[in-house]
Image (spheres, coloured by chain):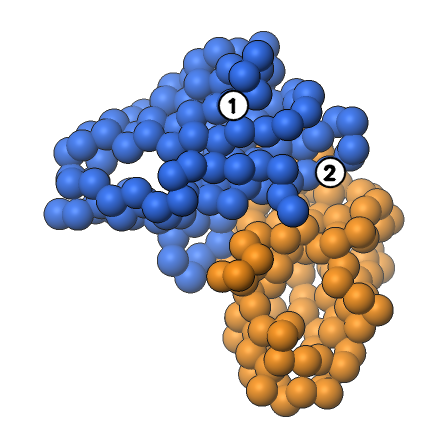
Amino acid sequence: DAGVIQSPRHEVTEMGQEVTLRCKPISGHDYLFWYRQTMMRGLELLIYFNNNVPIDDSGMPEDRFSAKMPNASFSTLKIQPSEPRDSAVYFCASSFRIEETQYFGPGTRLLVL
Amino acid sequence: SQQGEEDPQALSIQEGENATMNCSYKTSINNLQWYRQNSGRGLVHLILIRSNEREKHSGRLRVTLDTSKKSSSLLITASRAADTASYFCATYYTGTYKYIFGTGTRLKVLA
């Protein structure tokens, strides 16, 4: 298996633009997680899905953020409109069970100017 | 705020020395995991210890879990420059259904 795949790896955009981050989890994993990492706030769980259903989105910072998982092999995290404070590294991870090992993707480094 | 707290926040040692980092948590857990993150990369799973285990080894890594003190420690023996990274503990809180990572320890191993 190729592991968790994220795209793009880097994204530079201007304030107000829409940003879409993509993730392909490891095949057979039932859980998918989206995280945000910054120096100031560390690693934050934004949302996670179980069998394509959002379970806990309490970490989503505000309505500008939305996440979807239309099928077991694809998820998106969308920011609309983007703001400079959204600049961070966004990670996607997947796992077989909620309590078990999470496998992380390489991350998307987002810079909002 | 995250419930997992780690100390020290940063640690600098010489190659060959042992490095110990600690993690505390606040409520009941079924297992606790340690991850490593190299600069600019995603997190990589190192080891999982279950609540009924007290100690676990993997190569140069030794993890302990003290459920009475709600704490865990990660020991890296005979450290190498390649061990330079940030180390995180993580756990799933069954009472609140939250999966939380600690604040991390930044380890620097000097050659």
Gap between marks 1 and 2, in whole Å?
18 Å
Identify the chain drawn in blue. Answer: B
Specify the colour of chain A. Answer: orange
Q: Which mark is residue A36?
A: none
**Residue B42 in the image: above or below residue A87:** above
Disc 2 chain ID: B
**Residue B7 in the image: above or below residue A63:** above
Q: Residue at x 73, y 43 (%)?
A: A31
Q: Position of residue A50 (x, y in %)?
A: 80, 43
Depth order, front residue of A58/A73: A58
- Tell me which amino acid carries mark 1: Ser
> Where does label 2 land, which residue?
B98
> Where does label 1 land, which residue?
B71
* Residue B61 in sight from this viewpoint: no
Q: Residue at x 47, y 37 (%)?
A: B6
- Tell me which amino acid carries mark 2: Lys
**Residue B34 in the image: above or below residue A33:** above
- Left or right of B91? Residue A82 is right
